Each structure stands twice: as C-alpha cells, then as structure tokens.
Image: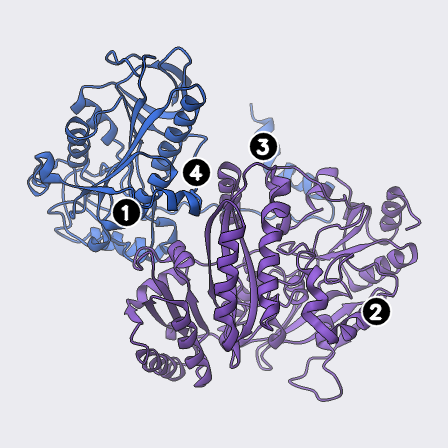
Chain colours: A blue, B purple
Amino acid sequence: MSGADDTRASGSPGPLRVLVSFKVTPDFEALRPADWAAGAVEAGTPGAGAASATGASSPGASATAPRDEVASASGTHAAPRVPTRCVRRVLNCFDESALELALRLSDTLAQRGGGADLAALSIGGREIDPHLTTLLALGYERAARLDVESDLDFAPAVVASLIARYVARREPCDLLLLGCCSGPGDGGTVPFRVAEALGWPCVSQVTEVEALTGGGLRVACTTDEGLLRLTVRGPAVLAVGNAVVSRLRVPTLRDRLARRDAPVAIVAAAELGIDVAAELGREPTALRGLEVVDRARRGVVVDGATPRDKARLLYDAHLRALLEAP
Amino acid sequence: MDLSREGIVEGLRRIVAPADVVTDEKILVQSSVDNFRKLQNIFDVHTMPVPAAIAMVHSAEQVAAILRFAAEHGVNVIPRTGGTATEGGLESAVPDSIIIDGSAMNEIVGIDAYNMQATCQCGVPLQALEDRVRELGLTTGHSPQSKPVADMGGLVATRSIGQFSTLYGGIEDMVVGLEAVFPNGAVTRIKNVPRRAAGPDIRHVVIGNEGALAFITEVTVKLFPYFPENNVFLGYTLKDMATGFAALRAVMVNGYKPSVARVYDPGDAGLHFSHFAAPDDCVLLFMAEGPSAIAQATAAGIEALVAGFPECSKVDSAYIETWFNDLCWDASKITAEDERIRQTRNVNRTTEVSADWGSINDIYQAARARIIAEIPDITMMGGHSSHSYINGTNMYFNYFFNVVGVGPEQETDKYYLPIIAIICEETLKRGGSIVHHHGMGKARAPWVKQEYGSSFYILETLKTAFDPDGIMNKGTIFPL
C-alpha cells in the first residue's frame, strides 16, 4: 500500500512526524458483574436511545469523562448506563500498543542517525492529563488534549472529525497511529473515518511497524487470510490491533523531572472550528441497548489416583471422540 | 550430605508413591526460586541451585518419614504449599534439596459452626476454605491479597496477615491449634482451645517458622459471622502522610475497630485512586463491618474523629467500595503482571515494616528519600499503611523500577536488595521491625540478629534444639 508522496516517510531528510491518538477508558475489569447488569437494565428502559443496535465506538481517540459517570450513549442519548465513575482510568489497550510502537519506531530511527517527531493527542477532561504528562516524560515532543466535556462514547463520527481537524489544522504528520477499537462499544470505525476525512490510506489490524533502511515502513497486519506485510509511505493512518507489543514503557522519576516543564496543550474544539454539541446532534450512531453475555469458562476436574489414570480418564471422556471422529 | 541426587530420589520413592516424586528438570528449575527472584521464572534465566526432587506428600506420616530420611543423610528440605512466598523462603539455597510439597493435602477436615472453628490440611487454598464457610454465613476473617492463590500451611508458616486485620488480627490471632512435624519425625499436635496459660504459648514456635523449624500439616482457625451487607466504607483525600498516620492513630487509640484502616501516599494512591485523587493527594480509607449496630457505630465514630483533621476531605464511599472489591491478586492478574514485566522490564516490588506511632512517619520519609536518591531507574516510590494497632502501624513500601543495563537475573542484586537494605537500615535505626507480614525468607535474613537483638538467643536456641542437623530450609530466617 502506498500513500501520497512524502519526503520524510520515503527516506528524505527530516524526522518522521508521528501522531498517536489515544483514549483513556474506565478500567472495565474492575467493574462487578452487577454493574453491567444494572447498565443493561437501564439501557433497556424506554427512551434509552435509539438507532444502531451494534453501537460503533470512539476507538483510539475520545475519552469517557468521569463527570458523565457512565459508559453511555452520546449526546442526547439517555444516561446513565454502566456506572464507571468509581473505577480508575486506564489506557485503551490498543492505543497503548500504538503509543509503544511509535516509541520503538523512534528508537530505531534514532539508532540509524535519523529520528521521529512524536506527538500525542487525546480527547476528554483533565483525567487524561497524567497520561499525557507520562508520554512527555517518555519522549513525546508534544502532548495535547482536546478539551471536550461531552461523553463521546458511541459517537465515532464526532470523534473522527475532531481528530482529522486536529491533524489538518494543528499537527500535520506523516503517520497517524491509533487503536483499532476500544472497550466501551467496539464499532472500530474511527480510524477509517479519520482516514477518509484526511484522504489518506488506512491500514487496519496493524501488529508491527518497522522502519525500512531505504525509507518508508514495513507494516504487518492481520487479515482473515493470515499475516499481511505492506510497505507504507506516509501519510497514512495505522489502526493498531492485537500487536505483540502491548504494554507502554514506564518513565523514571528522573525522566519525569527532566520534562516537568513540558506543557500539555489544551485545545478547545471551537479552536478547530467544531461545535461538538451540534455535531453530536447529527451523530448517526447511538447505543440502543446492552446485554449481559455470560462468557465464563467452565472446567471439568479430571480426578485420578495417578497421572496415568488421569490421562486415561481425559482421553476416554473428552479426547477419544474428537480424535476418532471421521 | 552423603547422598547423590539419584540416591535422594530413590529414597523418596520408597516413602511416597513414585508418581509423587517430581523430577522434571523444568519444574525443578522453576521451583528453585519463589517470587523474590520472580524475574528468573518470567525470563527463564536461572541461577539458583536446582532441587533434587519435589515430594508431593499426602499425610503427616509421609512428611515425618521424609524428614527422618533427610536428617539421616543431611539433605536440605524446603517445606512448601501454595508456593506464593515473596521473600525467598522457598528458594533452594543449596544444591539437591528436597521440596516437600503439601499442596495435595487439601482436605477441609471439619467446619464446626457451633464452636466457630475450621480445621483443614496445609494444602487447602484459603479461597476454598473461605468459599466453604461463606456458604454457612461465616468467614475466616483472613483476606491477604494472595487469598486466591495461597494455601493455609504457607499462610501460617509466614505469619500472614489479611486486609481486615485491624478487626480480625493476623493469622497468629486466628490459629487456635495445629499439627506440625519436626525434623526428627515427631508429629506434634497443639489442641484447639480458646486460650491457655499452661506455660509459654507454643503455637508461636510453629507459626511463622517459615519451614526453618517444622512442617505444618494441619491448622485450625477461628470463624466469624459474615455480614457483608453491613459494610460501611469511608474515604478521604489529604496532603501529607503525617496527618494520615495521626488520623489512623486517633482511630486506634480511641478504641475503634474498623476491619480496614489505611493511608496511601501520593505515589501509591496514584496507582489506585487517580480517578478521584489529585496527583499530590494522599488517600485515607476505612471499612467498618460486623453486625449493623457495630458497623454503623464504628463508621460514625471514625467519621467524627477524622472530622477533627480539617486537612482530610471526604470522598464518595462508592470509590472505596468499588476499589476494595477488586483488590485481590488472582492467577489472571499475576499472569498479566508477568507479561507487563516481560515487555517493559518495569518491576514492582514491596517491602513491609512496622514501628510505633512515634517513628513510622520518620521511617517512611527517610527510606523513601534515600531510595529515590541512591537507587537508579526508579519509576515510582511510594507506599501505604494498612495494618494498625494501639501502639503503632505498618508501612508497606510499594515501588517500581526499570531494569536497565543488567540481565533480569541480576535485578535483585542491582535494585531489590539495595532497596531492602535501605528500608531495613532506616527501620532498625528507629526501633521498628524489618518484617511486618511477608516473613524473613532469605531476603531479610542478613538482618536477623539486628532485628532480634539480645533475644536472638531464644530464636537461635529453637533452631539448634529442633533442627540440630540444620536440614530445615537453609538460609531462611537464619542466613547461611
């Protein structure tokens, strides 16, 4: 896949400009099943939103604002849903991969005598700022927060327009990395919407990003048929999926001290010429309902006096039929 | 030692079923360390002597026979149940040790709801016991973070403590009787009574012996009525630990018995409470439980006391309740943490000490400042107090560092042990105890004489009396 010509990404002088857009989400693992059940009940009540049954998400970009207290439908949609106010905020896992992949890309380029200019973006309230400060300590040159109070979960069109407009007006880049989706509502459409708005190609389900010595990038992504490796020249959008690299490195206290004066840029949506409330009114996607799905695994204890007995019992009761099936 | 590795294995196979003698090299290598050198297992780089075999025992008589065999041939023995030790107590300090694994002794022998006590074999997981007694509306009152993965024998052997200790006490307050096997093969049983004054309380020879004196095969612990519906949670933010310690002291000195009473410093609070606490906030929290009248009165009394500290701002109790419900470490969390370490080489360690109210803040401040100044690559240095008493409290140092410039197997030498040294030095300097509830293991054994002072005579005499051949868990409590 090859995007529009670009000097930096194709090996010409100058650092590769990389923007990573990430989302901070409630720690859903810390919620109790009862919390989800309560959300499902409330979502099922009359007037609790109407439109898409699937609920597209705002992956890789927006944030669930604690003040909204719920993982809920956006804009005019009824709230509350699942109560998330009482759990801490964490990086969306796919975005965490994207943030670390960008750092590794920068490390590789630096070892070759080049470099990358890294910037980070997120959307939401002040709860995001500690994450942005951490990224500055890790070597991101700039970190910005689009200050949006509205709950943008299930508002992928609004989120995508904010990101695309930010890239166009405030942070031109060669590569835009974001997670392929996020926890609350896994629609996974934001990367494609951003790419469409920018007129850039989009590679989805990215698992690895490697700088080529002659310029450009080798990008691995998973497909239904297997692993696909592409040569990518920016500008391009990379939507990071189940990457092997899934955890973000941690800055030392000295790293933090060294960047303590680096500011987090707070950008109002209006500065980008976007009226979020109006955009939410036009948002085509909404949460219609929540359903608690029991995904608990069940096990059978194979009890026998010796390992040989247990192996025999396992084989007879559970494996023989599978192995002997035609 | 007068036996080869093969001779040890052969001898064990005469005592327990051959299938119960584990000689798989990979398992043995993994069993050469515990969580003290957990990076060796995470990165599969091992440096410790490899045990000769693991003997899976099913009875006290088998334990006795193995101990007699080991004593006869001078073979080091490492008692083990759940294997969740954090201080090196399960490391093999010398080659060709025998690990006696009691995890197969996992029968809940009896639950006596009238006399409010439960008896179980050493390999019963605490979670299993707790689940069983909960069905009867009871609780053990013991809830360490390791509850989902730790077994009763190991918990007693290390003087474990749980998150509700301020009400229920540590494991030493819960054990009413036990059975233990000594190196000469003597199977001893301490009967289950509510109290005794027939000389010294010999339970405490066994509780906390860390496998250096005896192997615990059975324990009987107290039970308590369980009233989760009455739990009341309280939380506050504040700006300094001195105020937090003072508030905890006020609660304890005034006779209140919350099950949980904690204060977190800003670094540690940032890991748990960043959704409601500012980056420079400490967090003070309580849980009151028991019959409704007691829980309500306890919470009301604590609220009134904390109101006397205007620096403390109350937060919604739902924050504390939700956090507390997700606090235990189950197997999935441990696996996720191992993967995080594998990818980032950022390691989380903890060291817990105790001291009186007049010293604890000084220990916290001094140790924290020294660690930040002297240890490289620190990414977070914080801690909390989580177990309080009438005369003092504990400090649970919680810290993270990046492993840089050395292999994962050298993490303990470059980072962990120097940090432990600082904490022990600052604690001993102020008269505190260098171990609150993890056990000495091998990690803190070098400070045992300073910890005990002149009373080391008593401890040392126990060792020489019960383990004259020195076969019990070499290097644990007593340094090599």
- Disc 4 chain ID: A
- Disc 1 chain ID: A
Q: Where is residue A138 shown, x and y percent of the image? A: 38, 38
Q: Which residue in the structure is indicated by mark 4?
A: A247
Dot 1 lies on which element?
helix
Question: Disc 3 versus disc 4: distance between alpha carbons?
Answer: 41 Å
Q: Residue type at mark 4: give it.
A: Arg
- Quadrant assignment for the C terminus of chain A: top right
Q: Which residue in the structure is indicated by mark 2?
A: B466
The quadrant holding residue A255 is top left
Q: Mark 3 or 4, which is nearer the eye?
A: 4
Q: Please tell me if label 1 and label 3 are on a single chain.
A: yes
- Disc 2 chain ID: B
Q: Please tell me if label 3 and label 4 are on a single chain.
A: yes
Is mark 4 in CB contact (under 8 Å) with mark 2? no
Q: Can residue B185 be seen by looking at this rendering?
A: yes
Choose the circle earlier in sequence order: 1 or 3.
Answer: 1
Viewer-nearest residue: A302 or B341: B341
Question: Disc 4 versus disc 1: distance between alpha carbons?
Answer: 19 Å
Q: Mark 1 or 2, which is nearer the eye?
A: 1
Q: Is residue B260 shown above or below A255?
A: below
Question: Disc 4 versus disc 2: distance between alpha carbons?
Answer: 49 Å
Q: Which mark is residue A129?
A: 1
Q: Residues within 10 Å of mark 1 (few under 14, many from 20)?
A: some
Q: Where is residue B401 shown, x and y percent of the image? A: 51, 47
Is mark 3 in CB contact (under 8 Å) with mark 2? no
Residue drawn at point x = 23 percent, y = 26 percent = A192
Q: Which mark is residue A321?
A: 3
Choose the circle earlier in sequence order: 4 or 1.
Answer: 1
- Disc 3 chain ID: A
The quadrant holding residue A249 is top left
